[in-house]
Image: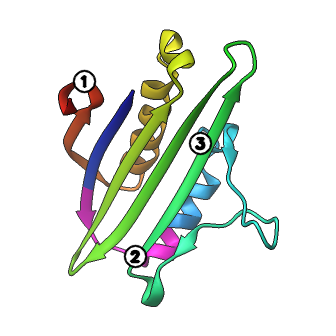
Amino acid sequence: MATVVRMKRRAVCDISEVVAQLQADTDLNTYIFLTDIISGEQSALMLPNNIGALLCYEKYYVRANGLVSLTILIKQEGEEQKATIISFMDHVVFFFSAEKSFSKMAISALKKLGFEQYEKLDSSLMY
């Protein structure tokens, strides 16, 4: 199962500031933020000239033996900043609906920053 949510807002700050605020969000950081493989530190992949960033989160559920992942792509398009949230879960975790609550946390974090949702697709609608 997967969920894709698209959000946007008028650009009020640099993409790097949006990333810093997302990384500081306590709800999101209860999950594992994927770290830079080389440095081992928390990081986001920043695109050249701060035109975008990619943040990845994941959480493993030991009891269900399943993984939930969350990817947030933020990009600058002229005077607008757009965010695409993609949450995905291992089929085993399906029973727990963890993937939807995971994407809700990202939506909530982005709403705090002034983003508004304009599109949502569930994998059940994609097939």
The image quarter in which residue 104 lies: top left
Q: CA distance from mark 3 to mark 1?
A: 25 Å
Q: Position of residue 57 (x, y in %)?
A: 60, 47
Location of residue 92 in the rendering, given as x and y in whole percent from the top left corner: 56, 16
Q: Quadrant of the C terminus?
A: top left
Marks 1/2: CA distance?
35 Å
- Residue pictured at 25% horizontal, 23% vertical: 124
Q: The residue tagged with tag 1: helix, strand or loop?
A: helix
Q: Residue furthest front?
A: 127
Chain part drawn in magenta: 8-18
Q: Residues within 10 Å of mark 1 (few under 14, many from 20)?
A: few
Locate residue 31, reporting x and y percent: 67, 39
Q: Nearer the viewer, residue 11 or 7?
A: 7
Residue 36 lies left or right of residue 107; in this view the side is right
* Image position of 38 (left or right of 13): right
Q: Nearer the viewer, residue 28 or 53?
A: 53
Residue depicted at 34% across the width and 35% down the height? 3
Residue situated furthest bottom in the rendering: 49
Give the secondary structure at mark 3. Answer: helix
Q: Which of the two discs, 3 and 1, sits closer to the camera?
A: 1
- What is the x, y in percent for residue 38? 79, 72
Closer to the chain start, of discs 3 and 1, is 3
Q: Which mark is residue 28?
A: 3
Indicate left or right for 107 with 71 as reference: left
Q: Which residue is mark 2?
A: 13
**Three-letter code, disc 1:** Ser
Task: Residue under label 1, please give it.
Answer: 124
Disc 2 crowd rating (10 Å Cα; few below 14, some 14-19, many 20+) is: few
Q: Amino acid at mark 3?
A: Leu
